[in-house]
Amino acid sequence: MFQYKIDEEVSLALPRPKIDAEAIYALIDDSREELLPWLPWVLDMESVTDEENVLKTNLKHFSEGDSVTVIILFNNQPAGVISFNRFRELDNSTEIGYWLATKFVGKGIMQRAVRGMCELGFTDYQVNKIEIHAAVDNTRSNKVAERAGFHLDGLIRASELLEDGYHDGCIWTLLKSDWDNMCNN
């Protein structure tokens, strides 16, 4: 398994569709109620095969350089997923997306995973800006961005179509210069 170790508890790993699909699907299934308000794709996850197909697609996009999706491991057990959803050449940026299974919430895992992705984004992928987009009322996601050192750039009206309709969104950013300052202090 190809892993990027963040600390003694948290690491990121490239998905292995045939091996990881069952565990990831179980996490989604156990966390449906908490994930669904913010991630409409949860409705499309009806079987392990559905998750295996998503992981295969993620690896295809990774091989083409379009995105990077990794499994968040907590004490070597799958806990969620985090990704660079796309790379934008216009401003040399990427956007992080993430979800964490309910049973792992409250352990600081996502904040550490986001910071690990920032390290990869700024060093390996040489991006200048990393964004996090979250619905205004998604308190947990907004707290992750804030605690990871991101700057709230502003709000965009009706920016996310979720299960119950349109939601205003927060745009959080972290620049390479911000990252360098955080790492040097």
Image (cartoon, helix red, strand yellow):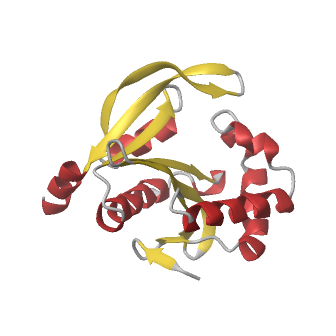
Q: Residue at x 42, y 77 (%)?
A: 8
Q: Residue at x 79, y 52 (%)?
A: 29
Pick the residue in front: 129 or 76: 129
**Residue 70 visible, this angle:** no
User: Can you give x and y, in whole percent of width and height, for residue 96 in the image?
Assistant: 47, 49
Left or right position of 149 against 72: left
User: Can you give x and y, in whole percent of width and height, for residue 19 in the image?
Assistant: 74, 76
Q: Residue at x 38, y 47 (%)?
A: 89
Left or right position of 48 against 115: right
Left or right position of 132 against 150: right
Pick the residue in front: 33 or 43: 43
Q: Residue at x 29, y 66 (%)?
A: 123
Pick the residue in front: 177 or 56: 56
Quarter of the rendering containing residue 36: top right
Which image quarter is the C terminus in? Answer: bottom left
Which image quarter is the N terminus in? Answer: bottom right
**Please, is residue 109 above or below residue 177 in the view?**
below
**Please, is residue 48 above or below residue 171 in the view?**
below
**Residue 44 visible, this angle:** yes
Give the residue furthest to the bottom: 1
User: Can you give x and y, in whole percent of width and height, for residue 167 in the image?
Assistant: 57, 21
User: Can you give x and y, in whole percent of width and height, for residue 124 in the image?
Assistant: 34, 68
**Please, is residue 56 above or below residue 106 in the view?**
below
Q: How many marks?
A: 0
**Please, is residue 136 above or below residue 10 in the view?**
above
